[in-house]
Structures are given as structure tokens and as C-alpha cells.
Image: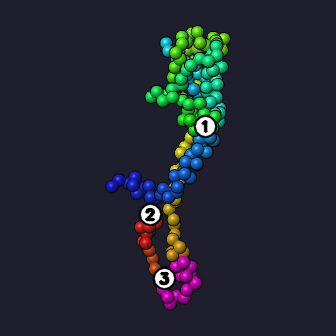
Amino acid sequence: MNNDHFNFFRKGQRAFVPKSFIDAKNHQRKLDAYKNTVIRFLLPDNKAIQACFYSQESVSSIHDFIESLFSKQNIKYDLCFFLKEKLQRDNFKNLIDGGLAPKSNLILSIKENVEQVFDESHFRHVTFEDANALNVEWLAPNSKYEPYNPTVGPENQTSQNKRSAAASSSSDDNNGPAPQRRNVDGMPKWLKR
């Protein structure tokens, strides 16, 4: 066995907590870490539309944004992930819950000709390098997300050791020293007994 196994026990053990508690903690940490979400809508002919959203916005705000760019009403379109899973309009899921934060690529599938669908006055044409620089700038307010990893630190003394230490300090010299236990700080609590 390598030393990493034993170092794990010295640093702390994974706590036994419900999955729902861990999920709630991780969700809150994502809300705290991801302030902005950048989404690239991939179009045919190696073009893309890039936009920044607040991560707390609903998934339906993405659909509203795309529809605001159309030059005419009632255009049929789909927003898809790379595995062709469609992004459904949802007023109750935010971008974090929708799996879009902190950044995502969505394929914008339109049945009509792309040049005829969009109002070009809404766009600023830039290179992909410039788009990447904007991406970094927009994501700058975000902090690093670190998943919640509940651990229990090693105990220095068990309650039995505390009692024997208290008894030895108040006992006479005739009783002798308190019984000594081996140093078992790095072992799991259930194995110490």
C-alpha cells in the first residue's frame, strides 16, 4: 500500500452525510462562484453569436434573447447541445441548474437561411480571438468553484482518553500511572476500539 492511503486518514475522513445535503451545498457554491455565464450560439459557415448572461437568469431568457435577434416573428428554431439534446424553454431553472454555467456552446438550428433571419444591426463582427478575449473579460467576476467535500478531522483524544487523563491527574500516587494507549490518531474512529 502506498503512503497516500495513510495520508488520507491523517488529513481527515469523508463524512457520512446525505447526498441531498451535499447537492444543496454544491448548488449554493455554484451560485456563489458563477456570477456570469457566457454562451456561444454556433451557426452554419463557422459563425457564432456570443452573449453574456447572469447565471441566475432563467433558461427561457436564452430563448428570449435569440428571438429578439430575429428580423421577423415566428421563426422555428432549436437550441441544442452537441449531443443533439434540445434545450427546452424553462422559466423555473436558472442557467446553473440548466447545466449552462459558467460557459456553454449551443447549436442554433434554423430551417431558414441564416442571413435572412437575423437583423445584422444587432451584431458586432469580431474574430474568434477577439471573442475569446471578451469571453475572459465577461467571466472575470466569477470565482473558482470547488465542490463541497465533507470530511471529519482526526480526533486527538477519544472520550475514554480524556476521562483517564482526568482521573490520573486527580488520583493518588499509589494507583500508578494511567494506562497508555498506542498512538492511533491516523486510524478510522471505528477501528480504534
Marking on residue 177: 3
The amino acid type found where label 3 is placed reads Pro
Spatial separation of the CA atoms under disc 3 and disc 2: 27 Å
Dot 1 alpha-carbon crowd within 10 angstroms: few under 14, some 14 to 19, many 20 or more: some
Query: Regarding mark 2 in the picture, which secondary structure is present there?
Result: loop
Name the colouring of the figure: rainbow
**Magenta highlight range:** 163-177
Relative image position of residue 180 (x, y in whole percent): 45, 76
Residue in the picture at 33% in, 55% down:
1
Pick out the residue farthest to the front: 74
Is tag 1's residue or tag 2's residue first in the polypeptide sequence?
A: 1
| Residue wearing tag 2 | 188
Q: Marks 3 and 2: CB-CB under 8 Å? A: no
Which element is circle 3 on?
loop
**Label 1 sits on what residue type?**
Lys
Between marks 3 and 1, how big is the CA–CA gap?
64 Å
Nearest-to-viewer mark from 3 and 1: 1
- Nearer to the camera, 25 or 182: 25
Residue 167 is covered by the magenta coloring: yes
What is the spatial separation of the Cα atoms under label 1 and label 2, in whole angstroms? 41 Å
Residue underneath mark 1: 93
Residue 147: x and y in percent read 53, 45
150 w.r.t. 60: above or below: below
